[in-house]
Image (cartoon, grey):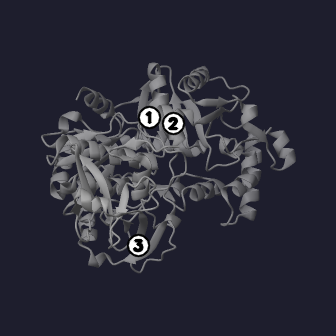
């Protein structure tokens, strides 16, 4: 399939430059219609004696809206095959496995009966007796999942098929004045109790969605079609996945030998008073059953909890030789063979060059080496220990690097880069190519699960991306949107950019700029006067503002 254009380069070129994986047809992530055309969904039959009419009505409306928006909805019998787990129990519970080529299964949440609870206890006892850390997700579910009242037990491939659970919307979730951390505590409980990637709560007037992005987005029923196309379809098309460690060249770094590690640690301490980075949650504190904890750990690549946002510091980009060359020099360079469109070329010193277009001017420039110190996944962002809480990621000639602090065991399961690693790298790459003044002396990036009021922004501050599809963290598509947003903002505003807010619907914002002190002061001001809040209160206003500007 021909690569699609985004920013001034095609998608395939950007992915190659940023070292990101290509594991599906390449599309422009700004177009959710194309995503919908590639998505296959099935609906698990409503269990007997299920009487919640609001959820049942929403289920039918959701099915109709998915079809209307181009999603392929597959009948349950066609989408499933008889289960092969313990024949007697499979027949007893009528277990059918959702085929691996289905991207999502929609189910309603029903509390298990006493009989079901008895068999769930039996299955967990069996699992505890035969438990082995080397078992795969499928093996764990084969031992314990046959008795569960959870749809994840109906999947052939839990890595490819997401579970979307429909349930009654918690009244607190509709309360705009309820604190974000309390809402997210409710949301996490629902995700864990249903063993689902996505939970949609339904009331008579509204519905809300929660996934591991930990948003608290609420929608009106008359906005269902828009929600399906711009929020739900992107989440199904591009599920949250942690960066795969075998894609990185691994090594160590000495935090004492880079000023950026200390700067990042100090940045975290300065941000503590904003309360934008609350303490994370440990799965072991919330998941009662060992088999479920083991499934989550496998899916999350060893991570044992979730945290809220990240902080990062991009080091000054490294160049060797001429940063800019003219067109004759560009034409004389060799083409990098892995880029079949000739967009990337290489000089005699093996430095990569690309042609970029900034304000309608062709600029031939070197692709720098990029290194970034960032908070590791799951740690306290406001109290970083440079010797154990900071990892260093790199991007050099399309190759990813991961360095952990010297002396730390490379196999430690809690030393993991952020889920947003591809987004962080895309932001750094795009800034170096299109807004080098942002990154020349290093650039802080702050991501939190909230939004600013549009009235908070002052001269030379901008926001972008509010009306993009709601793509989850950790995805190549989200990284592409952030890359494009920096290009478009820099192209419109030139060097007049003190602060850039990259909006990710149903997720949060990324705040970046060239001056750490300025960013901290602005965030402190915004949180003090209520113009920046965790949660989704200001997201609709940012969407409206983006449309009118």
**Image vertical order of residue 248 relative to residue 95, above or below:** below
For marks 3 and 1, the one nearer the N-term is 1
Q: Residue at the spot x=76%, y=58% of the render?
A: 126
Q: Do the numbered discs 3 and 1 sit on residues whose CB atoms are within 8 Å?
A: no
Q: Distance between the residues labelled 1 and 2?
A: 7 Å
Dot 3 alpha-carbon crowd within 10 angstroms: few under 14, some 14 to 19, many 20 or more: many
Q: Which residue occupies the foreground of this view, 365 or 63?
A: 365
Label 3 or label 2, whichever comes before in sequence order: 2
Q: Residue 404 carries which label?
A: 3
In the image shown, does 249 or 226 lie closer to the viewer?
A: 249
Image mark for residue 419: none
In the picture, which quadrant includes the C terminus? top left
Q: What element carries label 1?
A: loop
Residue 331, quarter of the rendered image: bottom left
Instruction: Pinpoint residue 481: horizontal percent, then vertical percent.
Output: 37, 44
Residue 476 visible, this orientation: yes
Q: Where is mark 1, residue-wise?
A: 31
| Spatial separation of the CA atoms under disc 3 and disc 2 | 36 Å
- Front: mark 3 or 1: 1
User: Does residue 51 appear to the left or right of 272 in the view shown?
Assistant: right
The image shows residue 384 at horizontal and vertical percentages of: 32, 66
In the rendered image, residue 50, in percent from the top left (x then y), is placed at 68, 26
Q: Is residue 407 above or below residue 218?
A: below
Q: Disc 3 or disc 2, which is closer to the eye?
A: 2
The label on residue 35 is: 2
């Amino acid at each position: 399939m021909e690569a699609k254009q985004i920013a001034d380069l095609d998608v395939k070129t950007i992915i190659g430059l940023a070292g990101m994986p290509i594991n599906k047809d390449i599309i422009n992530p700004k177009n959710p219609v194309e995503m919908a055309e590639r998505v296959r969904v099935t609906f698990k039959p409503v269990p007997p004696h299920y009487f919640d009419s609001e959820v049942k009505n929403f289920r039918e409306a959701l099915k109709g809206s998915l079809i209307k928006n181009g999603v392929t909805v597959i009948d349950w019998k066609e989408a499933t095959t008889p289960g092969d787990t313990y024949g007697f129990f499979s027949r007893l519970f009528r277990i059918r496995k959702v085929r691996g080529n289905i991207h999502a299964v929609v189910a309603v949440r029903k509390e298990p009966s006493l009989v079901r609870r008895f068999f769930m206890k039996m299955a967990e006892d069996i699992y505890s007796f035969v438990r082995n850390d080397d078992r795969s997700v499928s093996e764990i579910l084969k031992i314990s999942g046959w008795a569960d009242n959870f749809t994840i037990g109906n999947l052939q491939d839990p890595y490819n098929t997401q579970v979307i659970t429909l349930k009654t919307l918690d009244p607190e979730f509709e309360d705009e004045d309820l604190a974000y951390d309390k809402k997210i505590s409710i949301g996490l409980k629902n995700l864990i109790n249903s063993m689902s990637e996505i939970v949609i709560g339904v009331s008579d007037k509204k519905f809300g969605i929660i996934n591991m992005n930990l948003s608290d987005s609420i929608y009106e029923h008359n906005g269902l079609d828009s929600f399906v196309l711009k929020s739900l379809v992107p989440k199904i098309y591009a599920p949250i996945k942690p960066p795969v460690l075998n894609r990185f060249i691994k090594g160590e770094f000495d935090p004492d030998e880079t000023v950026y590690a200390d700067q990042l640690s100090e940045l975290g301490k300065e941000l503590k008073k904003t309360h934008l980075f609350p303490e994370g949650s440990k799965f072991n504190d919330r998941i009662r059953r060992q088999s479920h904890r083991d499934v989550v750990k496998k899916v999350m690549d060893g991570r044992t909890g979730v945290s809220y946002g990240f902080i990062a510091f991009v080091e000054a980009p490294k160049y060797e030789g001429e940063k800019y060359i003219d067109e004759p020099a560009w034409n004389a360079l060799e083409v990098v063979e892995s880029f079949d469109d000739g967009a990337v070329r290489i000089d005699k010193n093996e430095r990569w060059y690309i042609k970029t277009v900034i304000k309608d001017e062709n600029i031939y420039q070197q692709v720098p080496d990029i290194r970034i110190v960032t908070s590791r996944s799951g740690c306290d962002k406001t109290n970083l220990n440079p010797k154990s809480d900071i990892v260093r990621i790199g991007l050099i000639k399309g190759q990813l690097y991961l360095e952990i602090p010297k002396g730390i065991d490379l196999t430690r399961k809690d030393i993991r880069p952020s889920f947003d690693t591809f987004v962080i790298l895309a932001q750094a790459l795009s800034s170096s190519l299109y807004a080098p003044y942002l990154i020349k002396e290093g650039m802080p990036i702050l991501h939190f699960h909230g939004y600013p009021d549009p009235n908070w922004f002052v001269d030379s501050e901008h926001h972008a991306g509010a009306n993009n599809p709601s793509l989850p963290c950790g995805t190549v598509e989200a990284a592409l949107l952030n890359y494009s947003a920096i290009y478009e903002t820099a192209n419109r505003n030139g060097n007049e950019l003190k602060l850039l807010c990259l909006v990710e619907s149903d997720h949060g914002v990324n705040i970046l700029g060239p001056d750490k002190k300025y960013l901290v002061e602005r965030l402190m001001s915004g949180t003090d006067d209520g113009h920046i809040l965790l949660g989704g209160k200001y997201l609709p206003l940012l969407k409206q503002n983006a449309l009118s500007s």
